[in-house]
Image (cartoon, rainbow, N blue to C red):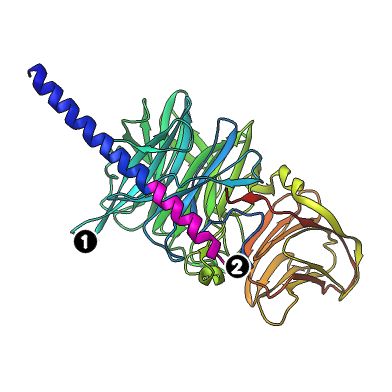
Amino acid sequence: MSLLKIYVVFVASYTVVHLESLRDVLAKAELEIYIEEKKIEINPRYKLLYHITPAVGWMNAPNGFVYFKGEFHVFYQFYPYDTQWGPMHWGHVTSRNLVDWKHQPTALLPGKEQCFSGSVTDNDGILTVMYTAHQASNDPPYYNETQYMAFSIDGIDFHKYRHNPVIVSSPFTSPDFRDPKIFKHNNVWYTVVGSKTDDHRGVVLLYQSMNIINWEFVTVLAESNGELGSMWESPDFFELNGKHVLLISPQGMVSQGDRYKNTFQTGYIIGNFNYDNFQFTAEATFQELDYGHDFYSTQTTEKDGKRYLVAWFGMWESTHSEDVDGWVGAMTLFRELDLVGTRIVMKPVDAITSLRMQTVSEGELARNSSIQFEKTAELIINVDLSEKIELELKGSGVGGDWAIVRWDVDEAKMVLDRGGDVRQVGWEPLDSMTWRLFLDTCSIELFCGEGEVVFSSRMYPNGHWRVKNLSPHPIHVVAYKLKQSYREK
């Protein structure tokens, strides 16, 4: 090829790349202007004060969770133009302590593809994204899913890889092939991806790469036995206390008594993984991670030997009362994970105590007595499991949602009854017999003991929170008002 032809090809390629980058910059700028203008119209009546929420529009699953250049970064599924699910973007927030959060510019905008969920990793100072590109097609089922990549030097401005996709298809015929989670072991990159088999059983697929760009299929890491759903979303795979943990969010599970009561589930399988033959050997059956009404699709990361987790504080097919207010969706509190035997326990990150303002109450709360909070609270309740314990949670006004938190001494079960929709599970404390109850504007999170049992549920009280002791005896309560923990800018 002559030098002139080489020059022409180079200029043409450079021009195309430059124009695409310019269009992307302009689209992001227009979106940020839209968000700034639109968020002043938001009705704040249900806005959570110490949980991550979108500035405007729709939020669902966390996409990526990583520590990068001194800050934690969390990304999330985001549609800014409506309070219903729509073409997926990646929202973005940052924090230094997993409690105080700041909104950042939208990280990824859809092009020909929707930017479905994925993960983020620090590759030697380059923040590297792998996400699912969901695209319409002309043939049934009229969509396909492949894996794309994007990169950022500063953790704010992201650029999609020119040669996407990096993983084109799964070994199965299903188009459902999504939510890659990247991790590294012994200088080799791996990613797990959720999918389904040809006979509609959930499955997690394992891929590997030497350079984080060129990927090859390795094995089926795990699959449903027929009882664990038809599709596994949001897989994660990591070590915890010498064991391997496979986190999954199965769809299509059938409820069994008190178990699997939500539309979709999130849980884990504990086992051992051999990197020589790529065999994952389970040591325990699938266990639910959280027993509340609104907990789905997790992301984890590790920092200083600690494993942290966050989830979408919602559930598909749930009612979102804030959808008329210009926004929908939230993230749970961030939790630190530990493994006791084959059971994961979760507790709020230590920095959550920095949100405590004044002590609202400390001492015995008499039977039928109440404590009232404006919008936020943390309650620490000492419990005697030889006796019935019951708290009523509702608003100070007439109507609105209500819930009952109860220790059923006869059944040895923890119960969360949200307006007649009951979740319950057995509780055997490891050590402390306490409840740690977090209330935000329209949410409840209850941590029992050391985090052996956790409930996460959304509810919409009318007026200020009112917590009433319905137990047949006084209970000891320490209650704090909590301050707001995130900034829109």
* Residue in the image at 9% along x and 20% along y: 4
- The answer to whether 472 appears left or right of 116 in the picture is right
Residue topped by disc 2: 258
- The answer to whether 338 appears left or right of 233 in the picture is right
Q: Is residue 95 above or below residue 313?
A: above
> Measured from the top left, where is residue 118 in percent x and y?
42, 45
- Amino acid at the residue labelled 2: Asp
Q: Marks 2 and 1, how far apart in space?
A: 37 Å
Helix, strand or loop for the magenta stretch, by majority: helix
Query: Is residue 167 something one can see in this rendering?
Result: no
> Which of the 4 quarters of the picture holds residue 200?
bottom left
Residue topped by disc 1: 140
> Measured from the top left, where is residue 473 in percent x and y?
90, 71
Residue 270 forms part of the magenta stretch:
no
Query: Looking at the image, is mark 2 or mark 1 earlier in the sequence?
Result: 1
Q: Secondary structure at mark 1?
A: loop
The stretch in magenta equals: 28-43
Q: Assign the N terminus to one quadrant of the image.
A: top left
- Amino acid at the residue labelled 1: Pro
Residue occupying the far bottom of the picture: 398
* Residue in the image at 56% along x and 72% along y: 321
Residue 40 forms part of the magenta stretch:
yes
Q: Nearer the viewer, residue 474 or 108?
A: 108
